[in-house]
């Protein structure tokens, strides 16, 4: 029997207790602890940032000398910080991506994507949607990430994602795959981490 889905699990309750907007905040914290992706004073772009958990963690990591931008189609309640700027729009809008770089004052040190499509249960359609989201995230990163920068993208297990991994591997000094203990036990998601972008 498949494991039941428990939305209000340990990480959900933990996030709620400390004020994070989503349990996904702990995924970025786990990645940060392992790979030191974000450093103080850096510029970070969060693709598909709703509801804002990764924005909160990124803000904490870059500090007051850093800058965090987030893009999502869904409006989010603004976080009270001069460090964070939210853009309501599509991450595949090239003009919007250019605007985020202009407003940041330079290309970003880190680009993050925790995006996932709404799944239909139709295997082939879902597989194509998952691959498409990952490809859009990397396309956006190519437009906005500075040489030497870091990239994180959520993906799901499939043969197509293995090919995607091989493709982005050539664009970074190091490319890693990581399954997280903070992911839901019923999920087949994992993360690709690209360190040292080759522009």
Image (cartoon, rainbow, N blue to C red):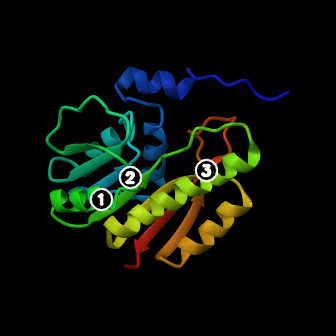
Q: What residue appears at the point 46 percent right and 25 percent down from the top-left corner?
A: 14
Residue 129's mark?
3
Residue 16 placed where, x, y %?
Answer: 41, 22
Is 62 placed above or below 145 here?
A: above
| Image quadrant assignment for residue 89 | top left
In the displayed image of the protein, which residue is found farthest to the right? 1
Residue 10 placed where, x, y %?
Answer: 55, 25
Residue tagged by mark 2?
91
Residue tagged by mark 1?
97
| Image quadrant assignment for residue 37 | bottom left
Relative to residue 30, is residue 83 drawn left or right?
A: left
| Residue nearer the viewer, 114 or 137 | 137
Q: Secondary structure at mark 3?
A: helix
Tell me if I can see residue 96 in this picture.
yes
- Do residues under tags 1 and 2 come within 8 Å of each other at their CB atoms? yes
**Quarter of the picture holding the N terminus:** top right
């Amino acid at each position: 029997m498949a494991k039941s889905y428990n939305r209000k699990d340990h990480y959900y309750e933990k996030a709620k207790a400390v004020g994070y907007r989503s349990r996904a905040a702990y995924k970025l914290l786990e990645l940060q602890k392992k790979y030191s992706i974000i450093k103080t004073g850096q510029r970070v772009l969060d693709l598909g940032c709703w509801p804002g958990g990764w924005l909160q963690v990124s803000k904490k990591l870059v500090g007051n000398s850093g800058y965090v931008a987030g893009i999502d189609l869904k409006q989010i309640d603004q976080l009270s910080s001069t460090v964070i700027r939210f853009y309501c729009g599509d991450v595949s809008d090239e003009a919007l991506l250019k605007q985020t770089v202009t407003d940041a004052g330079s290309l970003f040190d880190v680009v993050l994507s925790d995006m996932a499509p709404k799944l239909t249960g139709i295997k082939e359609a879902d597989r194509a949607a998952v691959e498409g989201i990952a490809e859009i995230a990397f396309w956006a990163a190519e437009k906005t990430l500075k040489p030497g920068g870091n990239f994180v993208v959520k993906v799901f297990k499939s043969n197509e994602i293995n090919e995607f991994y091989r493709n982005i591997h050539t664009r970074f000094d190091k490319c890693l795959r990581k399954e997280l203990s903070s992911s839901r036990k019923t999920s087949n998601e994992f993360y690709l981490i690209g360190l040292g972008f080759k522009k």
